[in-house]
Amino acid sequence: MLELVDLDKRLDKEVYRETFPALEDELGKCQRAARAAGVPVLIVFEGWDAAGKGTIINRLTQVLDPRGFRVHPISAPTEAERLHPWMWRFWNALPPAGNFAIFDRSWYGRVLTERIEGTVSKRKWQEAYDEIQEFERQLTDAGVVIVKFWLHIDKKEQKKRFKQLEKTPATAWKVGKEEWVHHCKYDKWLEAVEEMIQQTDTACAPWTIVEATQGRFRRVKVFETIIQAVQAELDRRAAQPPPVLKPMPEPVESPTREQTILDRLDLSLSLEREEYEEQLDAVQKRLFRLEHELYVARVPAVIVYEGADAGGKGGNIKRLTRGLDPRGYEVVPVGPPNAIEKSRQYLWRFWRDMPKAGHITIFDRSWYGRVLVERVEGFCTEDEWKRAYREINEMERQLADFGTVIVKFWLQIDRDEQLARFEARQNEAAKQWKITDEDWRNREKWKQYNTAIVDMLTKTSTTYAPWTILEANCKLYARIKALRTVADALESAVEKA
């Protein structure tokens, strides 16, 4: 495909002088309009060494308001970044609504540099295509504009530019042994670039090939492309009716309704206090040992707690962490998103807290809020919560592919037990902080929540991240079952590492 690109394209000076200043003004207006409309913009520059990425980024930043953009020069991952899933650092770099993020190289390094240099296995860089497409689709579904450029020059032009750069001490540092090695492997790189573009040129995030032989032509094409992409999103939002946010109605009773997994639970399962204390001590000692083995094996673990209000999540987490070294785990309590979190794709705040290899992160509530409380209370649109099942499964699969142990708990109690716990909290001064008006409101929507829970369990219990349901009417029974489940999962992971 790239062999068909006409690298002789030029703009004469007069046309450039008539065209480019107007484009600079228009880009400034686009940036201001994107900020006003809350449109995040990702601009990705990939291309050959010496194709002019730095020059065009410099020109862009001269035009844009510096308060509304950030440039991310991407090089080989640091040691800290290598201890996380490879897309983690790019999730962390996402701009808030209304801002621009400019990437000088990007997540495409995995299917280019890392592939060519052999720093990742073939299986890993091939898997990366799916992960890249998922990443870009999730962002564009959330209203992010992604503009991707490949700056193209031929091998002869690249050699010419290397020679010119080497002549001047101020620029000679840009051309080293690595750049000449890449030049010698131009054809091998070309094959990888062709495949990258074919695999990731999608409707939501298309590639723009920039004929980069002449600077004037390159600048005009890049500016025109960015303006058109941002304006298209602004026009789309202007023509779109306001999103419909409505609470979930009470499910209609049907004679064909079958028993759900929640209906079939035996909530009478219990443990006596003496037996519980004995088992708790044994499993906590086991967890302490496994946590250290996990660290040595550099295996990360994610433990998710979801459950009915007053289901016992806090007490369960407390018994789990009592058996762990506090230097090796973190508990992340998840509440409603704040303003900063709302300004980005909803999974962004959870990606930030994913553990590095060898560590454990325990989420007290999680990303499942989108398909539970946000669905039931109408805090997101129907399209958003329906889309979330796929997005969550994709995120968890990426974590699992990195080697992360994923343990997910749903704590289930019946309505009578919940009422008893609510009343106990109200009547005991030390526990009154645990009960709120919101808890009582949620209780009135028991049927809606049950429907959402069953859908969540059904659609997101996968081979790599299955749900474990804890029969939690007896807190002692639920705690032991949870701790044993975690211990078994960690042990299995350590044995495989």
Image: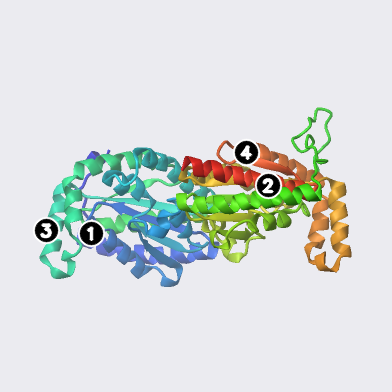
Disc 3 to disc 2, C-alpha distance = 64 Å
Quarter residue 12 falls in: bottom left
Residue 27 percent coordinates (x, y): 40, 63
Q: Badge 4: few (under 14), some or many (20 or more) residues near its Cα, within 10 Å?
A: some
Q: Nearer the viewer, mark 3 or mark 1?
A: 3
The residue that appears at 37% across and 59% down in the rendered structure is: 78
Disc 2 to disc 1, C-alpha distance = 62 Å
Q: Earlier in the sequence, mark 3 or mark 2?
A: 3
From the image, tell me which residue sits under label 3.
163
Q: Quadrant of the N terminus?
A: top left
Nearer to the camera, 417 or 322 = 322
Q: Is residue 43 left or right of residue 50?
A: right
Nearer to the camera, 19 or 184 = 184
Q: Is residue 40 left or right of residue 52?
A: right
Disc 4 to disc 1, C-alpha distance = 52 Å
Q: Which mark is residue 461?
A: 4
From the image, tell me which residue sits under label 2.
482
Q: Is residue 96 left or right of residue 24?
A: right
Residue 191 percent coordinates (x, y): 26, 39
Q: What's under tag 3, amino acid-wise? A: Lys
Q: What's under tag 1, amino acid-wise? A: Gly
Q: Earlier in the sequence, mark 4 or mark 3?
A: 3
Asked if residue 381 can be seen in this view, the reply is no
Residue 176 percent coordinates (x, y): 17, 59
Disc 4 to disc 3, C-alpha distance = 57 Å
Disc 2 to disc 4, C-alpha distance = 17 Å
